[in-house]
Image (cartoon, rainbow, N blue to C red):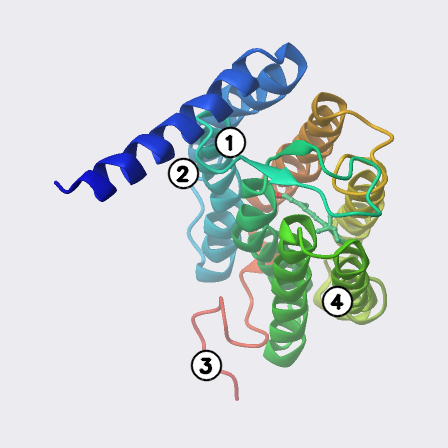
Amino acid sequence: MTAASTTATTVLQATQSDVLQEIQSNFLLNSSLWVNIALAGVVILLFIAMGRDIESPRAKLIWVATMLVPLVSISSYAGLASGLTVGFLQMPPGHALAGQEVLSPWGRYLTWTFSTPMILLALGLLADTDIASLFTAITMDIGMCVTGLAAALITSSHLLRWVFYGISCAFFLAVLYVLLVQWPADAEAAGTSEIFGTLKILTVVLWLGYPILWALGSEGVALLSVGVTSWGYSGLDILAKYVFAFLLLRWVAANEGAVSGSGMGIGSSGAAP
Ligand code: RET
């Protein structure tokens, strides 16, 4: 090992353990992460048990997509709690914490790129929507998460942080349009409108909390501390992921016949005519 690479390794290790120390010394932040790891573990076991008798391909696909939500979550929170996906960022001039090193749990925004499409896939399959509409919702959602990650990571310009925040909100509007306008009609035709209506309201109301929290937290105007913001996200996650997924799976397990028919031919065994 050369002297240069030894130094680089030492710096990297020092940075990650610094981050870990900072997380562990902040009880509010640390507890917001570990509570979710424990909860995701319990939820994974519960969902395995709830889905064991599901047989039809479309219902199975809904179950796998729903299972992936706590699976991604436990990995995401383990990444945050270990300090791997958390870093110190120096905020640019103009930001409320300009010049300060702020702890940024950027791994959250990264892993939403994997978890939120699963939520939408499950909802789209429940509504038995068409593939173009499903593709639109999922790609717009990925766009929202990736540009939200960019907004959090930009340290070169305060203005550009908010420009990316605005782009992310524009993607979010497209997701909301699909959820509120297109899929309710599909669910009506598929005979799943009652449960879809409940899950749609839960999703829309809770998802609106995320950009509000981002704007108020240390990434945005810094009215809320890192620990309070993290508990805010953790609380929203508990409802938007675990409670949402539990309601969906409980319904699917009890009403498998209603989601076993064919529609767009994605989750169903029969090919589209
Ligand atoms: C950000 C900031 C930029 C603007 C917008 C956002 C929206 C985030 C949302 C996240 C939902 C996450 C869920 C995670 C579950 O695993 C990125 C906060 C619009 C809606 C449901």
The spot of residue 244 in percent (x, y) is 68, 39
Camera-nearest label, 2 or 1: 1
The residue drawn where x is 70% and y is 39% is 240
Task: Indicate the amino acid at tag 4.
Answer: Phe
The spot of residue 222 in percent (x, y) is 82, 34
Find disc 4 in the rendering and name its residue.
Answer: 171
Q: CA distance from mark 3 to mark 4?
A: 31 Å
Give whichever of 180, 99 is nearer the camera: 99
Circles 2, 4 touching at the beta carbon (< 8 Å)? no
The residue drawn where x is 67% and y is 68% is 140
Find disc 1 in the rendering and name its residue.
Answer: 80
Q: What is the number of the mark on residue 200?
A: none
Query: In screen coordinates, is 220 left or right of 18?
Result: right
Q: CA distance from mark 1 to mark 4?
A: 26 Å
Helix, strand or loop at label 1? It is helix
Task: Indicate the amino acid at tag 2.
Answer: Arg
Q: Quadrant for residue 172, please give it.
A: bottom right
Q: CA distance from mark 2 to mark 1?
A: 31 Å
Task: Indicate the amino acid at tag 1.
Answer: Leu
Label 1: how many residues lie within 10 Å, few (<14), some (14-19) or many (20+)? many
Task: Answer with mark 1 or mark 3, whichever residue precedes in sequence.
Answer: 1
Give whichever of 102, 134 is nearer the camera: 102
Q: What is the number of the mark on residue 271?
A: 3
Find disc 2 in the rendering and name its residue.
Answer: 52
Query: In screen coordinates, is 13 left or right of 238?
Result: left
